[in-house]
Structure formats: structure tokens, C-alpha cells
Amino acid sequence: MMLSKNTVNTILIVCCPFIVLFTLGTWQLFRLNWKNNIIAKMDMPAVKVEGGSIDDFAYRKVVVEGILAGIDLYVFAGMNSYYVLTPMLLSSGQYILVNKGLIDKKQKEVNIKPKKIIINGMLYCDSYKGINKLIKNEAKDDVWPWLDAESISKDMGANFSRCVVWAADKLSDHIAPTTLPKPRNYHMQYMITWYVLALIWLIVCYVKNKSNFAVDPKHHKST
């Protein structure tokens, strides 16, 4: 039994948009699982980071111990405010940036002395994501346009981890600690939307083209 040419064309017209819509829904399903995993990590108890791969603790509450350097770096945070970043030498010998919080540019600290300290915070390892690679993240007066630990590391000729400790402790009298917000998770709604659109597309195409699905009598073979 052979399908008519019109039937084949109709199937192609129906299948291509359906596959696209279904694929978008499935992609949102993977994104949903990824976001749920991040949120679950952020709610887990704190873990002490002493060595090994720091990336393994991404989005976890962490406790880090080491020597906080005597320099401050600044990243634009909008509305005339800046994140204050300070390099930290961990007890494991690794270097990492600590986000101490928000500050007004006019309130820069001076004569900071290195000190050994224990910091509670959240480990953020995705600062490089969503960065416009066509625009270079270059510092001007120790101020970077956006937070990207890797570009800051290269610019300074240092070997910082690409992760940043988002400090929960108040590390300076005039620096307000900030909480790393949980990522917005609308992927369930997006997934349902794409799957429903795919189903609607099938129904509409069937109703409008059901006559094209008839078997071509010229190619019908009786058994």
C-alpha cells in the first residue's frame, strides 16, 4: 500500500514543526532537571572546602579557611554600586575570589592588611556563563564591567579558580553582604507550553488535511 504524493507532502509539513516544538519541550525538561538540581544543592548543609576540585561544590554552602589578601577588586553591579572581590589563599594552596558584598565606589577601603580568616558563603562557579565574548571584560581603575572570574584572573596574571565564594559573613563595616539568589525556575511552564503547542499543531493539521491521508487507489494492492 503506497501513500499518495499529497499525503507524503502533508506528513512532511506536519512533522517538521512538530519535531521542532517537541524538541524545544524536551530541552526545557532537561533545563528543569538542571535547575532543580541547583536549587537542591543550595538547600544542602554547608561543607568545608579544603582541597581537590572546587567545582565539585558549585552552588553549595561552603566554609573556606585561608588568608584574605590586602587588595580589593571591583565589579560593576548596577545603580552606582559595585561588588567587592578579594583574592583568598586557601589552606589547600589554591587561590579563589571572595565576593564580600556591595559597596559604593566612593567608599573604597585603603591600607587593608592580609589576614587569616574562616568565611561562610555560597560557591558560585558559573560567572563566565552568559558573557558576551565579543566584548572584552577589561578593568579600568580596578573596576571590571561584569563578574567573570576567568577574565579577571587573566587580566591580573593570577591563577584564581573560576569559582567565587559569595560571602554570607559581614567582612567589613561598610560592605553589605549579598545573598546569591536562587535561580528562577519557569522551565515546567515552558515545557508544558511547547508540548501543548506540539499537540495542538498535530490536531489542527489533521483536521485540515485528513483528506490527504487517504490511500492512493492506483497504488492499492489487495491481499
Image (cartoon, grey):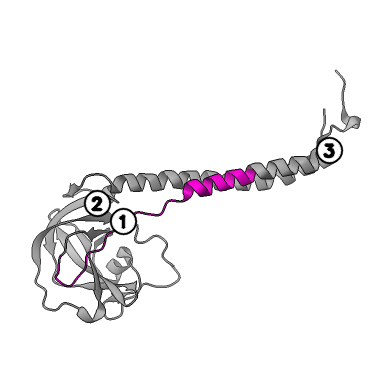
Find the distance from the CA under tag 3 to the CA under tag 1: 56 Å
Q: Residue at (11%, 74%) from the top-left corner?
A: 112
Residue 205 highlighted magenta (yes or no):
no
Question: Residue 79, position in %: x, y?
Answer: 34, 75
In this view, the residue farthest toward the right is: 218
Compared across the picture, whether 27 is left or right of 117 comes to right
Find the distance from the CA under tag 3 to the CA under tag 2: 61 Å
Task: From the image, tell me which residue sits under label 1.
Answer: 125
Q: Is residue 19 at all visible to an observer of this figure?
A: no
Q: Secondary structure at mark 3?
A: helix
Q: Which sits earlier in the primary sequence, circle 3 or circle 2?
A: 2
Task: From the image, tell me which residue sits under label 2.
Answer: 54
Q: Secondary structure at mark 2?
A: helix
Q: Which sits earlier in the primary sequence, circle 1 or circle 2?
A: 2
Question: Residue 125, position in %: x, y?
Answer: 31, 56
Residue 196 figure quarter: top right
Extent of the magenta region: 171-198
Give the label, 3 or 2, closer to the camera.
3
Give the label, 3 or 1, closer to the camera.
3
Q: Say which amino acid is labelled 3.
A: Ser
- Which is more toward the observer, 223 or 77? 77
Q: Which sits earlier in the primary sequence, circle 3 or circle 1?
A: 1
- Which is more toward the observer, 104 or 144? 104
Q: Residue at (23%, 50%) from the top-left corner?
A: 61
Q: Is disc 1 in contact with disc 2, using a CB cutoff of under 8 Å? A: yes
Residue 176 figure quarter: bottom left
Question: Residue 113, position in %: x, y?
Answer: 9, 72
Q: Say which amino acid is labelled 2.
A: Ile
Find the distance from the CA under tag 1 to the CA under tag 2: 9 Å
The dot on residue 211 is 3
Question: Residue 28, position in %: x, y?
Answer: 50, 47
Q: Residue at (87%, 33%) from the top-left corner?
A: 216
